[in-house]
Image (cartoon, helix red, strand yellow):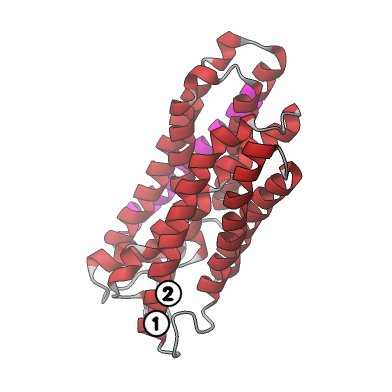
C-alpha cells in the first residue's frame, strides 16, 4: 500500500511537471512566433496543447486511482478518503477540497485548451488567436504550478491515525447524487470563461478591440454561461435538500460565490449585441469579461480553501 501510494505521488508530480513545462514553453514559443511571424514554429503549437491535455488527464486519473485504492500514504487521501464511503462517492471526494478542486480545474482547462486549439488550428497565424492561446497557456501554467508547489496535491504523509483522519469529506458532501454532477458542471462554467477572457486580453494586446474578437468569444461565453447556470440550479437544489435552511440559497457560500460571475457573465452577454450592431460598449464588455474571470478564480479559492 505504501509503495503504491509512493508511486502515485511520483506519477502525479511527474504529470504536473510535464503540464507546467508544456504550458510555459507553449506560451513562450507561441508568443515569440506571433511576434516574429514564424509560421513553422506556430505549426508546432498543437503539440503543447495535447501535452497539457495528457498531463491533466494523467494527474486527475492518478489521484482518482489513489482514492479508489485508498492509498493512505498520500496526504490528500487521508484528508478526504474514508473506508466507510462507497467507492463511487469516494471518487467524488476528489473535488471536495482545495487540492482536488485544482486538479478538476486543470482537467477542465486542459480540455478547453485542446478544443480551442483544434477549432482555431488553421488561424494560429492570426495574432488575435495566437495571443489568446498564450493567455490560456499562461493560466494553465499557473494552475499546474499551484498544484505542484503551494498546495502540494500529491504530498505524501506518514502512517495514518484512523482516529483522527481518513473520515471522508464533510458529511454534507457525502453520499448525495448531486455531488456527482454539480461540481463538474459548475467548473465547466467557471473554467469556460477563460476562453472569452483570453480573447479579450488578446484584443487588448493587438489593439483590435472592435467587433472581430466578439465573433470568436460569443459562443464560448454562451457555452460557459449555460453550464454555470445549470450548475447553480443543481447547487441550489442540493443546498435546499442537505442544508435545510428554508431556501434554495440560504447562506451557502458556494452558491453565493458562483452567483457573482453568473451576474457579470449575464451582463456581458447582453451588451455584446449592442457592440456588434452599433460598435458601442467596447470597454464595458472587456471589463465584464475580466471581472467574470476574476470572480471565477475568487469563487474557487473562497469556497475550496478548506
**Could you say whether the residue bearing mark 2 is in a helix, strand or loop?**
helix
User: Is residue 103 highlighted in magenta?
Assistant: no
Regarding residue 43, the answer to whether it shows in the image is: yes
Query: Considering the image in quadrants, where does the C terminus appear?
Result: bottom right
Position of residue 255 measured from the top left corner of the image (x, y, whole percent):
51, 72
Identify whether 39 is placed above or below 102.
Answer: above
Q: Which contiguous range is marked in magenta?
A: 1-30
Mark 1 packing: few (<14 Cα in 10 Å), some, or many (20+)? some
Q: In this figure, which residue is indicated by the disc labeled 1? A: 240
Mark 2 sits on what residue? Answer: 236
Q: Residue drawn 48% across and 40% down?
A: 219
Q: Which quadrant of the view contains residue 10?
A: top left
Image vertical order of residue 71 relative to residue 280, above or below = below
**Disc on res. 118:** none
Viewport quadrant of the N terminus: bottom left
Helix, strand or loop at disc 1? helix
| Closest to the observer, 6 or 183 | 183
In the rendering, at what x and y percent does residue 192 appear?
Answer: 50, 47
Question: Gap between marks 1 and 2, in whole Å?
Answer: 6 Å
Does residue 88 sit above or below 213 in this rendering?
below
Marks 1/2 in contact by CB < 8 Å: the verdict is: yes
With 263 as the anchor, is 185 left or right in this view? left
Q: Is residue 73 visible?
A: no
Q: Residue 296's image quarter?
A: bottom right
**Residue at the image point whose x is 54% and y is 83% from the top:** 251
Residue 32: x and y in percent read 69, 20
Residue 277's x, y, as percent? 63, 38
Residue placed most toward the observer, 294 or 80: 294
Amino acid at each position: 500500500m505504501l509503495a503504491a501510494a509512493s508511486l502515485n505521488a511520483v506519477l502525479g508530480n511527474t504529470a504536473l511537471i510535464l503540464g507546467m513545462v508544456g504550458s510555459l514553453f507553449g506560451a513562450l514559443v507561441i508568443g515569440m512566433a506571433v511576434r516574429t511571424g514564424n509560421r513553422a514554429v506556430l505549426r508546432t503549437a498543437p503539440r503543447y496543447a495535447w501535452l497539457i491535455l495528457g498531463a491533466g488527464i494523467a494527474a486527475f486519473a492518478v489521484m482518482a486511482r489513489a482514492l479508489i485504492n485508498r492509498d493512505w500514504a498520500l496526504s490528500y487521501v487521508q484528508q478526504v478518503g474514508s473506508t466507510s464511503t462507497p467507492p463511487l462517492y469516494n471518487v467524488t471526494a476528489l473535488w471536495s477540497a482545495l487540492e482536488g478542486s485544482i486538479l478538476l480545474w486543470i482537467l477542465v482547462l486542459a480540455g478547453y485548451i485542446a478544443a480551442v486549439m483544434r477549432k482555431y488550428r488553421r488561424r494560429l497565424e492570426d495574432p488575435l488567436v495566437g495571443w489568446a492561446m498564450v493567455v490560456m497557456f499562461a493560466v494553465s501554467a499557473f494552475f499546474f504550478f499551484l498544484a505542484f508547489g503551494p498546495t502540494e496535491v500529491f504530498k505524501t504523509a506518514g502512517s495514518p491515525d484512523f482516529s483522527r483522519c481518513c473520515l471522508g469529506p464533510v458529511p454534507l458532501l457525502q453520499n448525495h447524487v448531486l455531488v456527482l454532477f454539480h461540481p463538474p458542471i459548475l467548473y465547466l462554467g467557471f473554467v469556460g470563461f477563460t476562453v472569452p477572457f483570453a480573447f479579450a486580453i488578446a484584443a487588448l494586446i493587438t489593439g483590435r478591440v472592435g467587433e472581430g474578437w466578439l465573433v470568436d468569444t460569443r459562443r464560448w461565453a454562451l457555452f460557459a454561461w449555460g453550464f454555470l447556470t445549470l450548475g447553480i440550479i443543481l447547487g441550489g437544489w442540493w443546498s435546499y435538500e442537505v442544508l435545510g435552511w428554508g431556501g434554495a440559497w440560504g447562506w451557502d457560500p458556494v452558491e453565493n460565490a458562483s452567483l457573482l460571475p453568473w451576474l457579470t457573465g449575464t451582463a456581458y452577454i447582453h451588451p455584446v449585441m449592442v457592440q456588434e450592431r452599433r460598435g458601442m460598449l467596447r470597454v464595458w464588455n472587456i471589463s465584464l469579461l475580466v471581472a467574470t474571470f476574476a470572480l471565477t478564480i475568487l469563487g474557487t479559492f473562497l469556497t475550496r480553501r478548506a
